[in-house]
Amino acid sequence: MDAFDWALVLQTIFVIGAMAFIGLSVSWQQVVELLRQRKQFTRGFIANMVLTPLLAVLLILVFDLPVDAQVALLLLGLAPGGMNMLQFTTKIEGRLAHAAAALLVMTVIALLIVPLVIVFVPLPREPGEVTVLGTVVAVLAAVVAPMALGAAVRHRWPETARKVARPINLVSTIAFVAAIIVSASVKKEAAQVLTPTVLLVLVLFVAGTLLIGWAMGGRDPVRRQFLATVTSIRNAGLVLLVAMVIFPRAGVDLVVLAYTMLIIPPNAVLTITKMVQGKRRQKRALKGSELTGG
């Protein structure tokens, strides 16, 4: 196996582990509760599946981008539900179960949309490299099967599911980091796709999705922060796996890798800022109650 094969194996391990973690962590009751909040769900759907894809298309039309970058941006725009969102949304007060359910719903949406785009939209690919429909089926199997298995384990043995979920998520995260490192090392010849213009567009895409989520979150600051994070973190894992399989010799995966590097800092700053503000409010409220009591 060469380095690219190892990168593909590591990325597959990440996707399988991430999907198994979702199945192990999310109950049907949590999903139903999320869908019952129709106003919030509608806002989230519009932000993720209408405004964000439109932003991606607008950036493609405005800027002169390489084809690889156009493909990556289009797929990212149509694929919500990035696993990294759990690292930030679970830190938001009262949003742990909501975050897990939102991740499951967004992942299912991505699974419905991305294969359709690959099969029916005339994206550039090397003829004879892969059978696209067969590859899509294989990718779906790598995603759906572990998620279904995880859900079955949670239903039958909930305590076991709780114990194994975190280790599986840890292994998945390590595999993703390793895949990024290996992929970057074997695609040096395709690094020319990461021009200053492409990096600028990725920054604008991240900033735009954060603003879209924040604006669609309504007046509640907690809901604004939650939707901003959910909207800005796209399903890079799924898109990266698709890119490595469908476009093995192109630079699509490098653009996705660059995107994964760019989404962490702003979401980390947003999360830490809100946590600090929340603690300050709690301290002020505590002091106020002490003065009132005194």
Image (cartoon, rainbow, N blue to C red):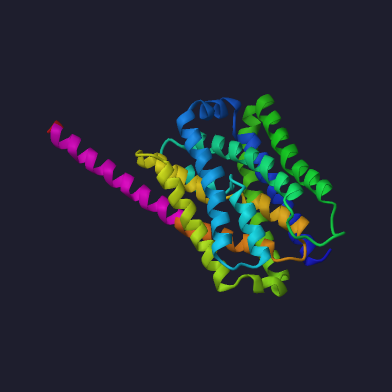
Does 203 sit left or right of 131 as displayed? Answer: left
The residue sitting at 23% across, 38% down in the picture is 286
Q: Position of residue 9 (x, y in %)?
A: 76, 55
Look at the image and tell me in which quarter the C terminus lies.
top left
Q: Position of residue 254 (x, y in %)?
A: 66, 65
Query: Which quadrant of the figure has residue 225?
Result: top left
* Extent of the magenta region: 267-292
Q: Using the rendered image of the protein, determine whether residue 102 is visible from the camera's viewpoint.
A: yes
Does 265 sit left or right of 241 as displayed? Answer: left
Look at the image and tell me in which quarter the N terminus lies.
bottom right
How many numbered markers are drawn?
0
The residue sitting at 68% across, 62% down in the picture is 252
Query: Which quadrant of the figure has residue 3?
Result: bottom right
| The magenta stretch spans residue 287 | yes
Q: Using the rendered image of the protein, determine whether residue 87 is visible from the camera's viewpoint.
A: no
Does 269 sit left or right of 155 as displayed? Answer: left
The residue sitting at 46% across, 34% down in the picture is 40
